[in-house]
Amino acid sequence: MTQADQRPAIDPRPLSSYVAWAGNRNKGPILAVFKEIFPKSGDALELASGSGLHVKYFAPHFPSICFHPSDCDADVFGEIKSSRSGDRNANVVDPVLIDIMDPATFPNPKYLLFDVIFVINLFQVAPISIQEGVARLASSALAPDGILAIYGPFMLDGEYTAASNEAFDKEILAAGVAEWGLKDIRDLEKAAARFGLKLARTLDLPTNNFILLFNRLR
Ligand SMILES: C[S@@+](CC[C@H](N)C(=O)[O-])C[C@H]1O[C@@H](n2cnc3c(N)ncnc32)[C@H](O)[C@@H]1O
């Protein structure tokens, strides 16, 4: 049986078997990159955490980083909190409600600036304005030397980077939800630039995904 055969049908709901399948497949390669780029200590904010699968997996590898999960859907918070018991994952704080589309829900930069902000597998199942939202939030909440890491499949210069991404995009578009679909790295760069951020690195990950690393323009 091939991996594609085992893949559940696309379903972006945070606790779906599809999202768990994708997370279990990508968490190892993402961790390998994060081990290279994360600071030794500090605060890391995850946007759109869903079930919290990634913070649960990453936290033990970064004992001096405090992980801050978040989502716009408070119904997932119980699942995120379930990763902690006793000392296990004590460096994961309670999830907070952040809607990337609503600046009123953004963290208050007077209290804390984040060394890292990351978001995994959201852009392809979100409206195009998600780019502006993430850039706006990062411009307000990132520490001066902070990094924004965005993981997922993307287009580049209006082209698919692989046949598998084209097939995936067609599958997402077939769901009939307006504005879903793969976003273009160039559009993300433009949105980031409007908020004083620049694309510093584009990292290739398995199965034609990327990690896009942004930092503040100097
Ligand atoms: C496909 S799931 C991905 C979850 C997780 N990042 C992962 O890879 O397993 C998308 C998540 O994005 C959240 N989400 C969607 N729109 C959002 C928004 N505007 N602001 C914050 N979270 C959002 C959903 O509630 C859901 O938990």
Image (cartoon, helix red, strand yellow):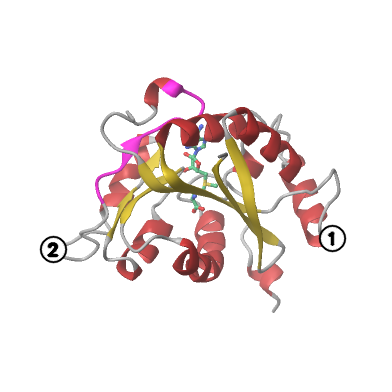
* Image quarter (top left, top right, bottom left or bottom right) of the N terminus: bottom right
Image height of 165 relative to 133, above or below: below
> What residue range appears in magenta?
93-103
Tag on residue 138? none
Give residue 127's position: percent from left, percent from top. Answer: 64, 31
Give residue 140's position: percent from left, percent from top. Answer: 44, 30
In the image, is residue 5 part of the stretch drawn in magenta? no
Q: What residue is rendered at 67% in x and 31% in y?
A: 128
Look at the magenta stretch and give its main secondary structure. loop
Q: What residue is rendered at 26% in x and 62% in y?
A: 64
Task: Answer few, some or many: residues within 10 Å of disc 1's Cα (few below 14, many 20 plus, some between 14 and 19).
Answer: few
Viewer-closest of 163 and 63 = 63
Q: Can see residue 209?
A: yes
Q: Name the residue under label 1.
A: 163
Viewer-closest of 124 and 210 = 210
Q: Which residue is farthest front?
A: 218
Report the Cα–Cα distance between label 1 and label 2. Answer: 46 Å
Image height of 214 relative to 24, above or below: above
